[in-house]
């Protein structure tokens, strides 16, 4: 009987709050075929998500790795490579899958020393010259979360055959099981008749929350009984400024900040319309969650969202940074409940057929198998696979 191959997933935790990268990684390790693979998680910065992985029964260890993009970290790279190399040997790792570009160079060097493949996940947009600056071309395979991100990698000099697009997937049944929007509305004093738009993303400049708030203020000229629910961690201290912006636009008491929530499904369920105002977005896994909840969406026409949302069918796409266009899209859908319901249903169907977890895991497993099949015979004999 062939024992399962051990895969080391490297995740860079930047705080107790997390976004789509961690959600996706949790989904992947939870759905690995245990007869073929065993997962070990290495947290390269911080250990806040450790309990979430351990709930899944996954071995989780902490090993600080310096980020390559910070020049002052360069002198520490050889020591980090050596420490990782020792860990790969001790744990008999067959393949490394890096979840963050910052760790790709160290992981690639350690993998080359030991003779095992390295996969690097690209989850966000980068200017083309960043791909080589971060030494992403050292990895054996790059996984892009969207065709847009893949195109940037190729523009950055990565050979096209070395970059594969793998869309993230979610289980749509989870959205059906845990939604309870009525209690969320009641907690915040939002009446059942009020139309609620909302977004889920940590509060950061690239998420475009200022555009969303300006668009809401304009939309209220046509729809007065309108509220906005924002779910996300304020890691950069930007919430106060957004609150002041809302008050200055006459939205006092109309914009609700719920902070970080581990389970966002009840909050999505409380919304009539989901909005993603990102200036750039490599993928946007929260769009999958919103669509799985049957919500129509308004999103910006950037890389990930433009591949997830079928414009005019499951939602509407608008230019980034354009509050007027976003306001028009909000009013158009908020005034048409039948269209919203139809879009929500079509969005749920799209998740089930295109972005389900089975498709993602089938592609990932095939990629792992292809890489592992290239391992030298000497590693097979030593039992490292």
Image: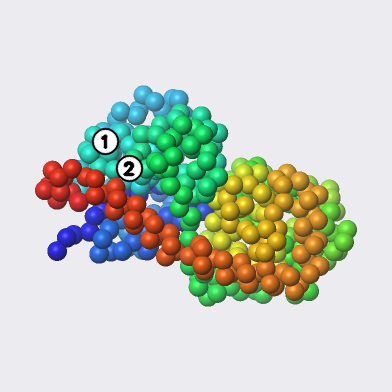
Residue drawn at the location 13% of the way across and 43% of the way down: 378
Residues at circles 1 and 2 in contact by the CB criterion of under 8 Å: yes
Q: Is residue 256 visible?
A: no
State the residue position of label 2.
Answer: 118
Residue 343: horizontal and vertical position, in percent?
A: 67, 68
Q: Are there few (<14), some (14-19), or many (20+) residues within 10 Å of tag 1?
A: some
Name the residue nearer the viewer: 376 or 80: 376
Give the left or right position of residue 369, taking residue 279 as reference: left
Q: State which quarter of the image contains the N terminus.
A: bottom left
Which comes before the other along the chain, label 1 or label 2?
1
Name the colouring of the figure: rainbow
Give the left or right position of residue 83, taking residue 127 as reference: left
Residue drawn at the location 52% of the way across and 69% of the way down: 352
Residue 70: horizontal and vertical position, in percent?
A: 46, 29
Residue 335: horizontal and vertical position, in percent?
A: 81, 67
Name the residue nearer the viewer: 230 or 163: 163
The quarter of the picture where residue 261 lies is bottom right
Q: What element carries label 2?
A: strand
State the residue position of label 1.
Answer: 112
The quarter of the picture where residue 78 lies is top left
């Amino acid at each position: 009987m062939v024992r399962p191959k051990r895969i080391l997933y490297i995740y860079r935790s930047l705080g107790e709050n997390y976004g789509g990268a961690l959600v996706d990684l949790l989904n992947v390790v939870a759905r690995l075929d245990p007869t073929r693979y065993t997962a070990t998680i290495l947290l390269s910065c911080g250990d806040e998500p450790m309990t979430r992985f351990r709930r899944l029964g996954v071995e989780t260890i902490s090993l600080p790795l310096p980020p390559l993009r910070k020049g002052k970290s360069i002198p520490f790279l050889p020591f980090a490579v050596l420490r990782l190399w020792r860990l790969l040997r001790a744990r008999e790792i067959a393949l490394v899958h890096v979840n963050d570009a910052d760790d790709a160079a160290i992981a690639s060097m350690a993998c080359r020393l030991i003779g095992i493949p390295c996969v690097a996940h690209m989850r966000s947009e980068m200017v083309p010259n960043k791909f080589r600056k971060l030494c992403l071309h050292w990895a054996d395979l790059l996984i892009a979360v969207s065709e847009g991100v893949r195109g940037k990698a190729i523009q950055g000099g990565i050979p096209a055959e070395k970059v594969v697009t793998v869309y993230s997937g979610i289980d749509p049944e989870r959205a059906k099981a845990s939604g309870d929007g009525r209690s969320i509305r009641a907690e915040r004093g939002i009446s059942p008749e009020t139309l609620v738009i909302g977004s889920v993303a940590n509060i950061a400049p690239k998420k475009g929350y200022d555009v969303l708030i300006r668009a809401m203020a304009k939309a209220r000229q046509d729809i007065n009984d309108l509220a906005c629910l924002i779910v996300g961690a304020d890691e950069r201290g930007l919430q106060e400024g957004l609150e002041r912006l809302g008050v200055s636009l006459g939205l006092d008491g109309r914009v609700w900040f719920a902070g970080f929530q581990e389970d966002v499904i009840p909050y999505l369920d409380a919304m009539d319309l989901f909005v993603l105002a990102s200036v750039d977005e490599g993928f946007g896994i929260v769009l999958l969650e919103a669509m799985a909840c049957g919500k129509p969406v308004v999103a910006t026409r950037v890389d990930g969202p433009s591949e997830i949302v079928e414009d005019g069918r499951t939602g509407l796409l608008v230019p980034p940074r354009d509050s007027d266009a976003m306001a028009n899209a909000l009013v158009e859908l908020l005034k048409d409940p039948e269209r919203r319901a139809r879009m929500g249903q079509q969005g749920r169907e799209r998740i089930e057929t295109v972005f389900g977890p089975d498709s993602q895991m089938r592609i990932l497993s095939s990629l792992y198998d292809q890489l592992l099949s290239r391992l030298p015979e000497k590693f097979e004999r030593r039992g490292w696979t």
